[in-house]
Amino acid sequence: MRIGIRCDAGTQTGFGHLVRELALAEELRRRDADCVFYMTPQSAGKDLVFDAGFYMCLPTAPNWVGNEKFDAFIVDLEHGCPMKLAEDVRPSTDRFVVLDGTGYKDEEEGRRLADIVIFQGATPYAKDLDWDGFEGKWYSGPEWVILRKEFVEACKYDYDREGIVILGGGSDPKGVTELAVDALRSRTGVTVVLGPGFDRELNCPRWWRILRNPDDLVSAMAGAKMAVASYGMTVYELMCLGIPTVVVSISEYHAGCAAMLESESLISLGEIGKVTPAQIEYALEELREPVSRVVDGKGAERVADLILGGVR
C-alpha cells in the first residue's frame, strides 16, 4: 500500500504540520503502508523525514506527482490545499485526504476535491467555508488531533511537576517566546524550549533552563506545572499531558481556535500584538488543574482508520 504526503516546514510556516504527518506516517507504517513525503526544496524538515526512515520526493514538472499512483494521498499545508495542487493530485489516487483544510484564504479551496477533510482540533469556521461541489466527508474536533507516540505514552506515567515551561513552537515567527520571557523574567524555575527553526538570540535570566530542540521534549513538558505556549500542535500535546496552559496565538484564526478550547485549565489571551506581559502573569495565577483530559492521544489511529478504510 503506497501513500503520498504533501507537507512542509520552515521558519515562517512552523513545524507542526510536518511533525503530525510524521506521527501519522509512523502509524500507517505500523499497518504496512509505505509513505512518501513530497516537500519543496527549501523545506527545513527534510532531515526529520530521513531520520524517521521515510522517503522524500521533490515536485515533478509540470505537476507535483507526475505519473505516480497512490492508494491514498494526504495534503497538510499551512493554508489548506490550493486548487492547483488538488487538481494535480486527484488523478493519482482514489483516496484524496486534506488535513487542516482551513480554507481561510479564498484561493485555497482544493479541499472541495477531497474524499476526506480532517480539521485538526478546534475549528470555528469549518461550517462557514464554501463546500460547493464537495462530495466527501469532513471531520473536526480534538479527537482527531494527531500526536507523536511519545506524548501518548507519557500520559501513562506520573511526573513530579514544578515550574513553568515556555513553548513558542518550532520556529515562533511572531515572537511568543520573547513575550513570555518578558512576562516571567522575575520568576525562577522557568524552562524555555526553542524549536529547530528558532534562529534569534534570546535574552533570558541566567538561572533559567534553555533547551534548544531537545531530544527529550516530552520530559521538559510533562515535568512542568504550567505552560505558556503558542497555539498549535504544542497546545494539544499539553492538553494530552494535562498541563494547565496560557495560550498566545500568532494569527486571528489561531486565536479563534484557541478560544474554543478555553476552560479553567486553558486560558486563551488572543492574538499576539494585543497581549501584554502583565496579562500572561495574571492568567497564570488564574489557571487550575484540568478535571479531565480532552485530548486522548488516539487521533493518529482514528485518522489512519479513515484513510485505510477506503483503500483496503
Image (spheres, rainbow, N blue to C red):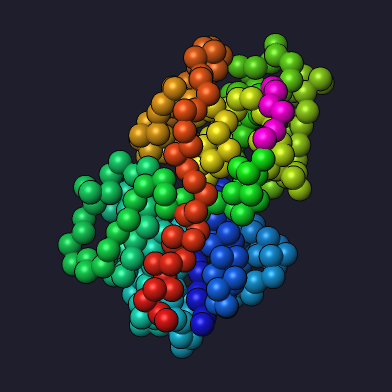
As for residue 243 lying within the magenta part, the answer is: no
Q: Is 17 located above or below residue 165 in the figure?
A: below
* 200 relative to 282 in the view: left or right: right
- Magenta-tinted stretch: 158-163
For the point 69% across and 47% down, the residue is 196
Percent position of residue 59, x then y: 53, 75
Q: Is 40 located above or below residue 176 in the figure?
A: below
Residue 260 visible (yes or no): yes
Q: Is 307 located above or below residue 215 in the figure?
A: below
Residue 66 visible (yes or no): no
Percent position of residue 252, x then y: 38, 35
The residue nearer to you, when weighing 49 against 153, is: 153
Q: Main secondary structure of the magenta part?
A: loop
The residue nearer to you, when weighing 122 against 230, is: 122
Percent position of residue 62, x then y: 45, 81
The residue nearer to you, when weighing 202 against 293, is: 293
For the point 22% across and 66% down, the residue is 134
For the point 17% across and 62% down, the residue is 132
